[in-house]
Image (tube, helix red, strand yellow):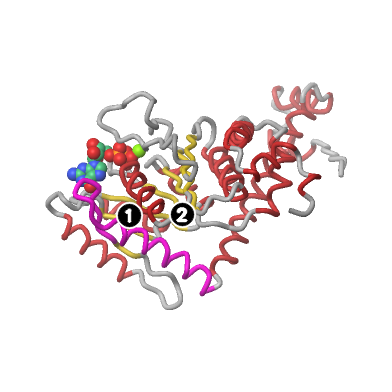
Amino acid sequence: MSGSSRLPPAARAILRGDRRALARSITQIENGEPSAEPILASLYPRTRGIPVVGIAGPLGVGKSSLINALIARLRSHGKTVAVVAVDPSSPFSGGSVLGDRIRIERRPDDEGVFFRSMASRGASGGVASATLEAARLLDAAGFDVVLVETVGSGQVDVAIREIATTSVVVLVPHLGDEVQTLKAGLFEIADVFCVNKSDLPGADTAKRDLDDLVAQGTHEGRWTPVVVATSTIAPTGIDALWEAIESHERFLDSSGARTASERHRLTVEIVGLVRERVGRELAERLEGDRELRTLLDQVVARSLDPRTAARKLHLGFPRDE
Ligand SMILES: Nc1nc2c(ncn2[C@@H]2O[C@H](COP(=O)(O)OP(=O)(O)O)[C@@H](O)[C@H]2O)c(=O)[nH]1
Ligand SMILES: [Mg+2]
């Protein structure tokens, strides 16, 4: 491989398929260690833009169970898979058992599967950007697909849009009020709806309700979400689920939406990084700043209001590169 020798040793190890180096680098990303930066920068040109599939939805709907089923399906088709669980309470085998929640099966003997959980401490934006960067390393490491399981609540679910190329929203029969919620929020993020636990009563109605909902929101030239019914107990619908994901990935290429949404995602990412950096630099500059102290005295004394003080502050940002 040309230019390989100029790569940082950790990046070279990752390209060689060294799983421990990969895990270590992801930890550095997770902890926001600057040592991750040269690794990410040097591997970015080696990424191919593999499918990153987000599996989102409320707790207990069967996301981990579906991921196990998808892994089996993908492995039997010779594809390698990396799984990132953003849900901190979604333990892998060997971790603690929480209620009757399913653990994503570790496959220690299978080099074609890699697991990673990302602690969702801090802001959801933090998890999103760490997950995005981890997915890039997994791409450079040669995996064919990344599956991301996310917690079911609000912000992280929405953040899946910034990470995943295809978003699957998992639901269960007896949607009831959930359909209303969907109209408001989740509907915006789903490329594929998965009605899991279709072995339970009410699955047909739930699928019909979703089909109706999707039909109402159909637009010429836009992707129409696919609704699939699955069961991980009876195993059914897993092939259909994967085919729906693949057909969305094909649509991204044929419609030009992949480039457009990639540009959008990268814009959000770059702006977020700038905001983060400016915020950090600002906090550093203002620490013990004499001008700020003087302004603060005036604000405390009610002779100046906070907004005016903020405008008066002279923030000369020297450019360092
Ligand atoms: N009846 C039924 N139960 C399921 C199905 N898939 C998962 N479950 C059960 O639902 C519970 C939660 O599954 P889990 O995969 O941990 O859900 P997650 O929280 O969304 O990751 C477990 O008890 C599973 O055995 C299914 O297709 N049918
Ligand atoms: Mg889970």
The quadrant in which residue 214 appears is bottom left
**Residue 121 in picture, x, y percent from top left:** 51, 30
Q: Which residue does the image show at 31% across and 43% down from the upper left?
A: 65
Q: Which residue does the image show at 83% across and 28% down from the upper left?
A: 291
205 in magenta: no
Q: Is residue 231 left or right of residue 66?
A: left
Q: Is residue 167 above or below residue 17?
A: below
Q: Is residue 8 left or right of residue 153?
A: right
Who is closer to the viewer here, 273 or 72? Answer: 72
For disc 2, the marked residue is 79
**Residue 24 in picture, x, y percent from top left:** 61, 31
Dominant secondary structure of the residues highlighted in magenta in the image: helix
Who is closer to the viewer here, 286 or 274? Answer: 274
Q: Which mark is residue 292?
A: none
Q: Mark 1 or mark 2: name the one nearer the start of the chain.
A: 2
- Which region is colored magenta? 228-255
**Residue 240 in picture, x, y percent from top left:** 31, 62
Distance from the alpha carbon under mark 1 to that under mark 2: 32 Å
- Are there few (<14), some (14-19), or many (20+) residues within 10 Å of tag 2? some
Query: Is any atom of residue 176 visible in this view?
Result: no
* Label 2: element kind: loop
User: What amino acid is found at the position of numbered circle 1 in the picture?
Assistant: Leu
Q: Is residue 68 above or below residue 73?
A: above
Hey, which residue is sitting farthest front in the picture? 109
235 in magenta: yes
- Do tag 1 and tag 2 residues touch (Cβ < 8 Å)? no
**Residue 183 in picture, x, y percent from top left:** 33, 58
Q: Quadrant of the C terminus?
A: top right
- Are there few (<14), some (14-19), or many (20+) residues within 10 Å of tag 1? some
The quadrant in which residue 92 appears is top left
Who is closer to the viewer here, 130 or 232? Answer: 232
For disc 1, the marked residue is 182
